[in-house]
Image: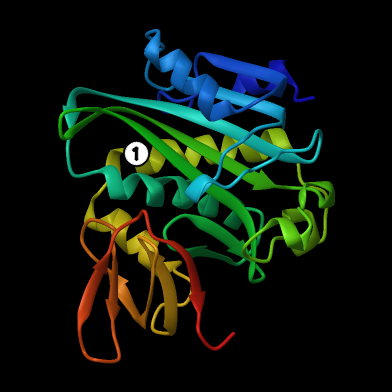
Amino acid sequence: MFDRSRLEAGLPIRGLGKPLYLFSTIDSTNARALELGQTGAPHGTLVIADEQTAGRGRAGRRWLTPSRSAIALSLLLRWEPPVGGVSGALSGFGALSVAEAVEGLGAQVEIKWPNDVLVAGKKVAGVLVEAQWQGSLIASAVVGIGINVRPGSVPNPDQVGYPAGCLEQAIGRRIDREALILDVVQAAGRWLPLLGSPEMLEGWEARLAFRGMQVSVDDSGVRVRGRFENLHTDGRMVLLTDEGERLIIGPNAADLRPIDR
């Protein structure tokens, strides 16, 4: 179980992480954060679980978090008044927060667009954003983050769509989970004011896996192939097809893969 007193002593950071809800076991940190948001929980509310039994990933996938081996957290963000133009950037915000914290451990990190974090070519973390809208504007969002820390957190190959790994295997030493959580929140506090800015886009692009390579991606059930050029100003993928058509792929696309692997 996580050390509550240690986490509370380090929080909040830049307005994030208080109140703190800490669970030994939960179905889904995102589900709980959404419930808290609907009952008036403030901006910066943080939900953390040692074990997650019904976590959700993108595209309806499951994300399980075995006890004492990983990190599952969800951060509630609010905007008053509601804002527009940041929905695509929220995925990058979560991935950048994890990437920066993991880089602090000495790892070489890549982001598999839009929001999977890779170390040594394997997925060690994922992000799920669930927004609450007022018309075309976002009033609040829950940014869910799952990080594989210890070997026990790595799922079997037949349970995942992309090769998975964990930080301790990649880095070769024991990882302090409480310290990593605080580092993720610290990075989130730094990136949040830059949400959707050119600086954030630059940080996201600089870490992109497969940029400049031939890739394929599932866009609304259609497999699209082309050269991954860069990111659009709103965080969407710019893909140049073999026919010379430039496509703008939205963040709901899934299963990005290099063609030559």
Q: Looking at the image, how many numbered discs can be counted on the residues?
A: 1
Residue 63 lies, in percent from the top left, at: 64, 43
Residue 74 lies, in percent from the top left, at: 52, 30
Q: Is residue 145 left or right of residue 212?
A: right
Query: Is residue 11 visible in this depiction of the protein?
Result: no
Image quadrant where residue 48 sits: top right
Q: Is residue 56 left or right of residue 65?
A: left
Image quadrant where residue 56 sits: top right
Residue 183 lies, in percent from the top left, at: 57, 40
Q: Residue at x 23, y 51 (%)?
A: 197
Pick the quarter of the image with the C terminus: bottom right
Q: Residue at x 35, y 60 (%)?
A: 220
Spot the residue most to the front: 221
Please state which of residues 99 and 164 is positioned toward the viewer in this rendering: 164
Badge 1 is on which residue?
192
Residue 140, placed above or below residue 38: below
Residue 23, placed above or below residue 248: above
Please state which of residues 185 and 217 is positioned toward the viewer in this rendering: 217
Image quadrant where residue 253 sits: bottom left
Spot the residue most to the bottom: 243
Q: Residues within 10 Å of mark 1 (few under 14, many from 20)?
A: some
Pick the quarter of the image with the N terminus: top right
**Element at badge 1?**
helix
Q: Is residue 163 left or right of residue 200?
A: right
Residue 133 lies, in percent from the top left, at: 25, 28
Residue 261, placed above or below residue 142: below
Please state which of residues 60 and 205 is positioned toward the viewer in this rendering: 60
The amino acid type found where label 1 is placed reads Leu
Q: Residue at x 67, y 26 (%)?
A: 49
Query: Is residue 43 visible in this depiction of the protein?
Result: yes
Question: How has the structure been colored for display?
Answer: rainbow
Spot the residue most to the top: 39
